[in-house]
Every structure is written in structure tokens, then in C-alpha cells.
Image (cartoon, grey):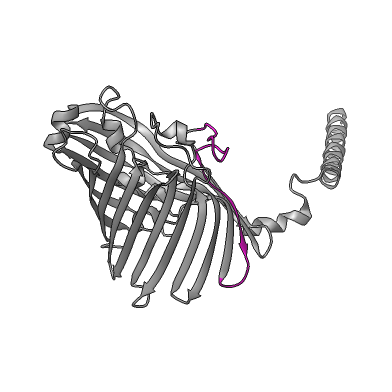
Amino acid sequence: MKIKSILSAVLFLFTIGIAQAQLRQADSVSTYRSIIPEDKQGLLKNIDIIANMQMGYRSDWQDSEHVQSNFRIEQFRLEIKGYVTEKVFFRFRHRYTSEFEPQSIDKIIKGVDFAYLRFDLSEKVQLTIGKTFADWGGIEFDMNPIDIYEYSDIIEMADNFLTGVGIYYQAFDKHGFSFQILNSRTQSFEELYQGLPKLEGSEFPLASVINWRGSFLDGKLTTIWSYSLFNEAKNTFKNYIALGNQLKLDKFTIAYDYKWSKEDLDRTGIISNDIPDNLFPYSVQNTLYTSHWLKVDYRFTNKWQVSFVGFMDKAKWEDDIDPLKTTDDWRTGYGVIPTIEYFPWENLNIKFFAGYVGRFYNYSDYATSRVGVEDYNTSRFMVGLISPLHIF
């Protein structure tokens, strides 16, 4: 009997304790405020957070000799974007696999791709202010960077994200035009170019970019064409043309870019990097870079795709400052990238890939004899995953 009485008393006290705990929990819910105020939580419906990732295992080779094999995060770009109001859109994207040093011109770290506001002035007109992409055309540059296994030379060496203002006008249903005024670079003239006593940095180191995006044949054929003019120094410019074209035919997608960069100063920098300081102790002038880029995708099932990327990059030095110069040709580079990609889930944008990146560099006889550069090649075998992981 005593045992029953003791058990009843313990059960009674335990029940009272649970009830009091529940009361305290309910009270805390009503007392403590959410981190995001309730009247602001509706804004999250218009906000996207995306983790753009490319990672995997790679083996690198140079001139048929193994260099190293390791796991590597090739790309990680965290992106937050959305509408603050019905007419004001913001976008921020930080590239964690890039430099974290603030740049001398725009005062923001180089690893920030986007930090801008966009104002929708009407259904057809948008105004962008901040750091954004230079809308200089081409299918290659318009792709999400995580889907690129290797860029062609001009894109790889360029400042692709610059600060300024731009306006986009959807003139017709299938044709839109944009115009941008941007900083021509993120670093100062003195940081980029060396030993040029006859040239001064420009008081207005700006770039203008004109772009046309077109659509034909019910969207099967699209174009991204542009012309850009960069002011690198006083009376010194870079002219850049990019002509991007893409054709979609059932399971095939074919894209072709032509790029042409005429530079009074060697902004791309490939030739300047090859020439040692003891020969020409300054950045070279009058260079020309051209690129042909081709991408073919074949989606033979919903979950499998094979892809091939091939490109050819030419570098020419058109200056006659060297009395021993026999040709304008400097270097021709080739790239081949065959890959196979697997998409396991329909409702999750993740793909696994396996592929090869081959680069082959051939120098002219003049470049080889004058500065001692030699032909070489690099190879990379890779397996991994890619995802613009949409968190919410």
C-alpha cells in the first residue's frame, strides 16, 4: 500500500512538472521575437539563395609528365538575389575561389562578381547600378561559370565583372539591346602596366559596351553580339567584338563564338607575360587576340549528356619596335574538352561529370628564337559534380 502511495505521489509531481514546462515553453514563444520580424518574413518569398559549385578530383599533366592529383573546389560562388520591392531588384554573388584584396579602382574585392541594384523602369526598360558583368556578348561568357571547365584565352585573362551603370531595352519580343558605361578595369594604370614613359593614365578610364540579344526560329536560334571600347590610357584604347550564336535542334545544342580584341596596350597580357623584363622592360603595345570557340551538346536521354568544347586562340604582336621581328604571329593555342554528364534527379539541379581538358600551345619561330619560349601542352582528367544548388 505504501509503495502504491509513493508511486502515485511521484506520478502526480511528474505530471505537474510537465504542465509547468509546457506553460513556460508557450510563454517563451510569445515573449521572444523571431530573428526576422514577422512583417518582413513575406519578403523571403522573393529572395533566392544559390550555392554555385563545381568540385571534384583531378589529375594534371604537362608535356606527358604527371604533375599532381588532388581534390579541388574549382568554383564556389554564393549568390543572393531578389526583389526588395516590385520595381527594385538586387543581386550579390561572391566568388570564394578568387582574390580577397580590395581593388584600387572600385574599392571592392575582386572576388565579388555582382553587387548591384536593378530598377525596372517599365516593362521594357531596366536600369542597373553597381558591380555587374560586362555584357560583351558570346555564348561562352553568358553561361554560368560553374558549367565552364576551361575558358578560352580572352575570357580567362579579362576583367569580366566591372562597376558602372547600364540600361537594357527590350525593343521587340525577341530582340533586346543594352548599353553600359563601366570602369575599364579594377586596378590602376600603374598597377597593370609597367615602364611606359610616353603614356599617361587616362582621367576617364571607362568602357562602353553595346549588346544585342536576338531570337529567331521560335527561339531555336539565339544571338549575343556586342562591341566594346575600353580607354586604357590617354588616346589609347582596346576595341573588342564578340559574336555569339546558338542553335537548338531537338537533342542537339550547337554554339559558336568569334571574339576579336584589338589592343593599343596589351590588356589581355599573354604576350607581355611571355617577354622577359631584360628584353623589353615594359608592357608591350599593339597586340591582337582572336578566338574561335565551339560547343556541341547531345542530350541522348533525360539523364545523360555528352559534350564537346573546342577552341583556337591566336595572339599577334603587331608593333615594329623590335628590329629583329620577322612576323606578327606570336602564339596559337588550342583547347579540347570532351565530357559526359549525368543528371540523376529531375527536381534537383545537380549533375555529375567526367571529362578531359587538353591545351596545346604553339609559338612562332620568331617568339621561340627571340625570347626562348617553347611549345608545350597541358592535360587534365577530372570527375566531380556541378550544381547551382537552390537553397531557397
Residue 161 in view (yes/no): yes
Instruction: Point out the image quarter for the N terminus.
Output: top right
Q: Is residue 341 above or below residue 15?
A: below
Looking at the image, residue 204 sits to the left or right of residue 346; the answer is: right
Looking at the image, residue 39 sits to the left or right of residue 387; the answer is: right
Q: Is residue 9 above or below residue 132?
A: above
Task: Pick the residue in front: 257 or 71.
Answer: 257
Residue 111 is covered by the magenta coloring: yes
Q: Residue furthest left?
A: 365
Task: Pick the residue in front: 200 or 119.
Answer: 200
Q: Is residue 254 above or below residue 195?
A: below
Question: What secondary structure do most residues of the magenta stretch adopt?
Answer: loop
Marks counted in the figure total 0
Residue range (magenta):
100-124
Instruction: Name the residue rendered at 78%, 56% in the picture.
Output: 39
Question: Which quadrant would residue 82 be assigned to in this image?
Answer: bottom right
Instruction: Name the residue rendered at 38%, 72% in the picture.
Output: 215
Residue 212 at what x, y percent from top left?
Answer: 42, 66
Residue 314 at what x, y percent from top left?
Answer: 22, 46
Residue 107 at what x, y percent from top left?
Answer: 58, 37
Residue 215 is covered by the magenta coloring: no
Residue 64 in view (yes/no): no
Question: Which quadrant would residue 247 be assigned to in this image?
Answer: bottom left
